[in-house]
Amino acid sequence: MEKITYSSHAAAIRAAMALNSVTQNNLCRKLGYSQPNLSSFLNGKRPMPVNMIEKIMREFNIKLIIEE
């Protein structure tokens, strides 16, 4: 598996959405979120709840590695 570093979980989610040709609307329908809330989270206007991050990362098979 290739390791790619992103500046934030939102950046990783956006990249995964682009690579998989998934729109915010499609992702929200599949996971049961509202599109305006997801947009606010991805644009940094609101903090993204940890359970939402985990669910989206599982959907795209993204591993989160925190490095100091």
Image: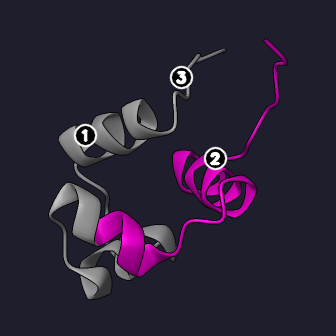
Pointer 3 with pointer 2, Cβ within 8 A = yes
Q: Which residue is mark 2?
A: 12
Type of residue at label 3? Leu
Within 10 Å of the Cα at label 1, are there few (<14), some (14-19), or many (20+) other Cα atoms?
few
Q: Which residue is mark 1?
A: 50
Q: CA distance from mark 3 to mark 2?
A: 9 Å
Tell me the residue at 54%/56% (across/down). Answer: 10
Please give the range of residues in magenta. Answer: 1-28
- The answer to which image quadrant residue 31 occupies is bottom left
Pointer 1 with pointer 2, Cβ within 8 A = no
Within 10 Å of the Cα at label 3, are there few (<14), some (14-19), or many (20+) other Cα atoms?
few
Viewer can see residue 30: yes
Tell me: residue 29, above or below residue 55: below
Q: Secondary structure at mark 3?
A: loop
Q: Which residue is mark 3?
A: 64
Q: Secondary structure at mark 2?
A: helix
Tell me the residue at 38%/64% (across/down). Answer: 27
Tell me residue 22's x, y (percent).
55, 66
Residue ranking furthest to the left: 32
Tell me residue 14's x, y (percent).
62, 61
Let me know if residue 51 is in the magenta part. no
Viewer can see residue 45: no
Tell me: residue 4, above or below residue 40: above
Type of residue at label 2? Ala
